[in-house]
Image: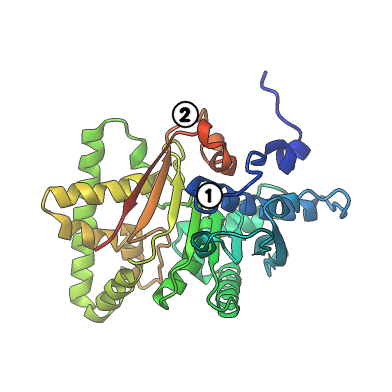
Amino acid sequence: MAIVAPVYDRENFYSIGPLHLTVVDWDNEHHRRSVAASLVAGVYILERDRQENRDAKHALASPWWEFFNFRLVRQLVDDVDHSIFGAIYEYELKTSSSEKSKEVIPHYVIAFRGTLTSRDSVTRDIELDLHILRQGLHKATRSRIAVQAVRDTVASSQHRNVWLAGHSLGAAMAILAGKEMAVMGTFLTTFLFNPPFISAPIEQIKHEGVKHGIRVAGSVITAGLAFAMAVKQPQQKNRSVETFSSLATWVPNLYVHPADHICSEYIGYFQHREKMEKLGVGQIEKMATQHSLGGLLMTAFGKEAEPVHLLPSACLTINLAAAPDLKKAHALQQWWQPESQVNFKTCAYLYS
């Protein structure tokens, strides 16, 4: 029988957190990723502290940011269920750093949690998960609160470094905010842990030939439908292309696990683009990359759709370590494990 750790231990920084990072090297990508993931974990625990009515003496959240010299500036609260879904942290510089390090050290980090299955938040969180499936997350009030918080923080930062970070549903929130800032010409360093990709789980197919064939067919159908709609509505097509192209300079950091069907389609999304380029049909894939089949169909029937998962560029990190189940493959904890214990593969995909 498997032994399940008590809830207290699963939320306690000193039980599961990255205690090995006693000194953060901000020039080290592994360190930056681990800190960002820990700050997202802090949001989860803030909400769990609220749900369990833990007083200051018994609250578990603060070590998740104080260990790295951050202070909590503001909690972001949902207007429907009043749950804490995000947090704004400010870094308190306590030691001198190199000029190079100062360029990457965040002054503020805005972090968003994912879905919590706890009684006080599960209904609202699942409602927002369904918004993602319907490609309408941008219309949810939580999204508007998140995007406005990012706008306000960037405006008050006086050109200092601002990071975005999120896990699962929270990663989708971070994508929405990051896209909005990128369109305005502000490209925020962004960490997206297990972000949802709305698609059939093609990446789970083991036969590479079958997988590639399905992707090619999907690209042709999507590009064909997009072209047909562009002929019918040329102004809408031009806006879509311009918006997608304006995002190309923003290169968020994506972290996915192949066994996590919630996010694993990002692997095929970016790798398939390269394969289509090599086959000499890159223009078809470029058209398909800018659209989702579901979004096109919704638009054709007069419904507004914004597929949050579509990204022109990204630095994609894949965790190649085996995961026994979806829970492990989707866990935030995998992204702050000691560098000597991980098996990651990273590749940058730049849209041009």
SS at badge 1: helix
User: Is residue 92 among the parts visible in the rendering?
Assistant: yes
- Could you say which disc has been placed on residue 33 in the image? 1
Q: Are marks 1 and 2 in contact (CB under 8 Å)?
A: no
x%, y% of residue 88? 65, 65
**Front one among 135 and 347:** 347
Q: What type is the residue that disc 2 sits on? A: Ala
Q: What type is the residue that disc 1 sits on? A: Arg
State which tag comes first along the sequence, 1 or 2: 1
x%, y% of residue 290? 29, 63
**Which quadrant is the C terminus positioned in?**
bottom left
Q: Quadrant of residue 128?
A: bottom right
Check disc 2: other Cα within 10 Å, few if <14, some if 14-19, many if 20+: few
x%, y% of residue 338? 56, 36
Residue at image position (39%, 65%) is: 250
Judged left or right of residue 303, residue 227 is left
Colouring rule applied to residues: rainbow
Residue at image position (71%, 48%) is: 118
